[in-house]
Amino acid sequence: MALPGFRKRRSANAAAADGSKEGALTDADVAQMKNLTKTRRNVALVSSFCYLLAFIFLVLVEIGNTKGTKVLGDIYFFKLNMANIIPQSVPNLTLVNSIARTLGLHDFYQVGLWNFCEGYDDEGITYCSTPQTLWWFNPVEILKNELFAGASIPLPAQVNEILSLLRIASNIMFGFFLASTVLDFIMIFVAPIVLYSRWWSMPVGILSFIAFILSTVAAAIGTAMSLVFKYALTSQSDLNIQVEVGNKMVAFMWVAVGFTFISFVIHSGLCCCCTSRRDVRTGRRGTGLSSGSVREKPNTGNKFPSFGRNSSSRSHVPA
């Protein structure tokens, strides 16, 4: 009597071994993938380079005016030239080089992100205050502390009215500049991850947009603050105070914003353009890989045993 036949079931180890062989990338596959993703890789590297440049310019904004050196001392938001200031009342003093020195003031004061520096026209910067977190420039307090006894200057009412607004704006600008600097530094290394899949382009694009907004708002506040001081002080002809906007600081701020914007545009485009490695593996772009790594996985589901039938007729034994 013939026994029913069972199909031999493949072991899990054998199936896994075959699957790994099919999914392994050959040298031709690697070359093909590099060729198909070349554009996306180059664009991602360009965005990283833009973040690097933006980071460098933001660092210059951060460290500008922190020391009285030739380089850092020329990077400031605005500079108050008070050498020829017209005082409201003058004590019985002898004129020394300039009216400002006679009153106990310095010839100029320049403002940075962390502190202020002061000095004389013929000596340059003589003192820089200690850098402080969330520092803001209070001209009324600084000038009153340096004026000699009996001397006073008629500060315009606009300066006193905007001091509280100036403090809030300065704190926002400080926080946004610091956050955008840190975020741009992180994005230098995060940006190339979009090479692997389009799904990474969305979160990276969101981070890029946040960095762009932070740097733009901070640069806008810094520029507006400098222009407001220039308008408020130079409009008072009875003071004779000259305000100089720091062109280098303004340039560094907006150049950093420009590079951050370029990176944001790049990552926005990578959400729908340029082939990623995942596109090649899944066969969405290109002709697929020759090693068969994009082939469908073999069906490893349970199969019922098939029973064979005996095709030969049974013989009847005579009684």
Image (cartoon, helix red, strand yellow):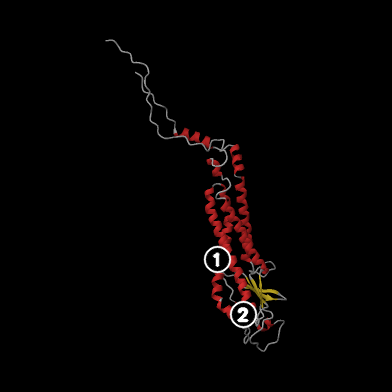
User: Tag 2: residue type?
Assistant: Leu
Give residue 274's position: percent from left, percent from top: 58, 47
First reached walking from the N terminus: tag 2 or tag 1: 2
Rendered image quadrant of residue 94: bottom right
In the rendered image, the quadrant that contains the N terminus is top left
Q: Which mark is residue 143?
A: 2
For the question of whether residue 269 can be seen, the reply is: yes
Question: Extreme left residue here?
Answer: 319
Percent coordinates x, y for residue 154 in the rendering: 61, 83
Q: Secondary structure at mark 2?
A: helix
Q: Quadrant of residue 101?
A: bottom right
Q: Nearer the viewer, residue 209 or 99?
A: 209
Within 10 Å of disc 2 (Cα), the crowding (few <14, some 14-19, many 20+) is some
Given residues 84 and 213, the one toward you in this image is 213
Q: Residue furthest bottom?
A: 92
Residue 190 in sight:
no
- Note whether 222 is above or below 183 in the view shown: below
Q: How much space separates mark 2 and mark 1, taking CA atoms?
A: 26 Å
Q: Give me the residue at 62% from left, 58% from top.
A: 259
Percent position of residue 262, x then y: 61, 56
What is the quadrant of the C terminus in the image? top left
Q: Which residue is depicted at the point 55% across and 54% down?
A: 205
Kind of residue indicated by mark 1 = Gly
Residue underneath mark 1 = 175
Question: Quick one: 108 or 78, which is closer to the camera?
Answer: 78
- The residue closer to the viewer here, 268 or 280, is 268
Q: Secondary structure at mark 1?
A: helix
**Residue at the (60%, 77%) spot, across then down:** 139
Q: Please, is residue 309 above or below residue 281 in the view?
A: above
Q: Position of residue 25 (x, y in %)?
A: 56, 38
